[in-house]
Amino acid sequence: MSGLDAQWQRALVALLERSHLLTGDTIATALDEVLAPLRLRPELYLVDHEQLELRPLRPGAGSPDRVDSTVPGRAYQLGTVLEAHDADGHRVLWVPLVDGVERLGLLRVLLAPDAPEAGPRLRERVVVFSGTLAHVLASKLAQSDLLVTTRRRQPMSVAGELLWQLLPPLTVATDSLALAAVLEPAYDVSGDAFDYSVGATEAYFAIFDSSGHDLSAGLTTSVALAASRTARREHHDLAGMAERVDAALTEQFSDHRFVTGVLARLDVGTGRLRYLVAGHPAPVLVRAGRAVRTLEGARRMPLGRLASLAPQTAEPAEELLEPGDLVLLYSDGVEEARDADGEEFGTDRLIALAERAAADGLPAPETLRRLAHAVREHRGASLRDDATLVLVQWSGRAAERLLPRPAGEDVGEDVGEVGEDRPRPGAGPA
């Protein structure tokens, strides 16, 4: 092991040793001390909930950087290490800060003036260090108000505070699956939610949308989310999960409030998708960059008291995915978002944008970030209803795109060349 490799190893060990007792407001100082022997000066930037800005964790460390149209923003969007110069002409590396595949922000590393060129070995080392740091940060998010509020550009509503605590991370992946989600308005979401559970052989995912847009809607969705998880963890099938949600909503609320949703299970070895649509917009299947159909094969009433008054006989429908297929789930707040002239965003516009993003080969969370921003720009102001998107790709290539890339090349149209999709034994047609 070279002397430099030994220094990096000591830095990693020091970070892990300190991590047990670190607090959110001591992470920046600890990083300074850990990386000082390597003559590197770090700053942490966390992305806000709307993914518009990269915000410095250390008070007084400077202004936020925009995610769009900046070098650090490009590093965040594409998950690649990029080199740039600061306002004083010093060289800096912008390194993706990724916990698993969840994008938290960036690690900014100021290089020493006489440091050699930031070659492949340095880039690989900072990616490994940044990944370890991201795990530490993720473990502290539930313990530190500083980490939480750094990610906020505006106050969070009580309903939003409730729901964000119940949701899983926005992005997850396995070696054959990538899943990403996004919610708007990020600081005032109340009735929408998503959920998932991924394993080596099977993945479950769902989207929910309760009636109303207030704290009451948030409570309704919270009950639906908890009931579906309980049923899933007790190994109920999709119909049994829906029945558990019906029963929980009926038991907890005396009125006729309801929740729409989509429940789905995917066999990640074969691509066999089973799904149930409960009064919700049907998911869209995108294949080879084109929307081929909506998945409307299994419809039942919305979840809640009305559904419990009559037997719900709909059986889950089945779709055999092909490697690389993309399934897009969305709530009605997406298609019903209106501009100043009253024109709806519409399903056709959503599908066209999803097709374009699929053709561009963007990482799944970046695809959804751009779709959500398109909805916000169309609306021109705060959304009147929650707008949630969930993107599921049965694709090893899509999963690999979520991993941080040490290479600093410009990743544009060639982003789709990372990894490849191959049918697995027993899989559907390629």
Image (spheres, grey):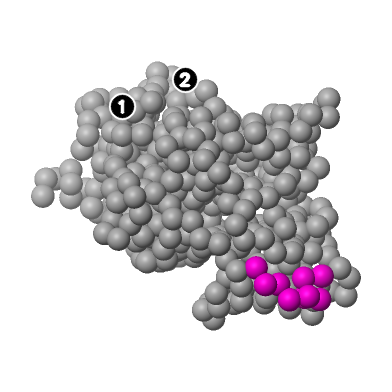
In the image, 371 versus 110, the foreground residue is 371
Q: Is residue 55 visible?
A: no
Nearer-N-terminus badge (2/1): 2
Question: Disc 1 designates what residue?
Answer: 409
Give residue 182's position: percent from left, percent from top. 60, 47
Residue 212 is drawn in which quadrant? bottom right
Q: Which of label 2 and label 1 is nearer to you?
A: 1
Residue at the location (45% across, 25% down)? 71
Q: How crowded is mark 2: few (under 14 residues within 10 Å), some or many (20 or more)?
A: few
Give residue 7's position: percent from left, percent from top. 22, 48
- Gap in Å between the C-alphas at discs 2 and 1? 23 Å
Residue at the location (33% across, 57% down)? 427
Residue at the location (67% across, 60% down)? 299
Question: Disc 2 designates what residue?
Answer: 87
* Total numbered circles: 2
Q: Is mark 1 on a helix, strand or loop?
A: loop
Q: Does the magenta stretch include residue 121?
A: no
Q: What element carries label 2?
A: loop
Residue at the location (34% across, 44% down)? 397
Disc number for residue 301: none
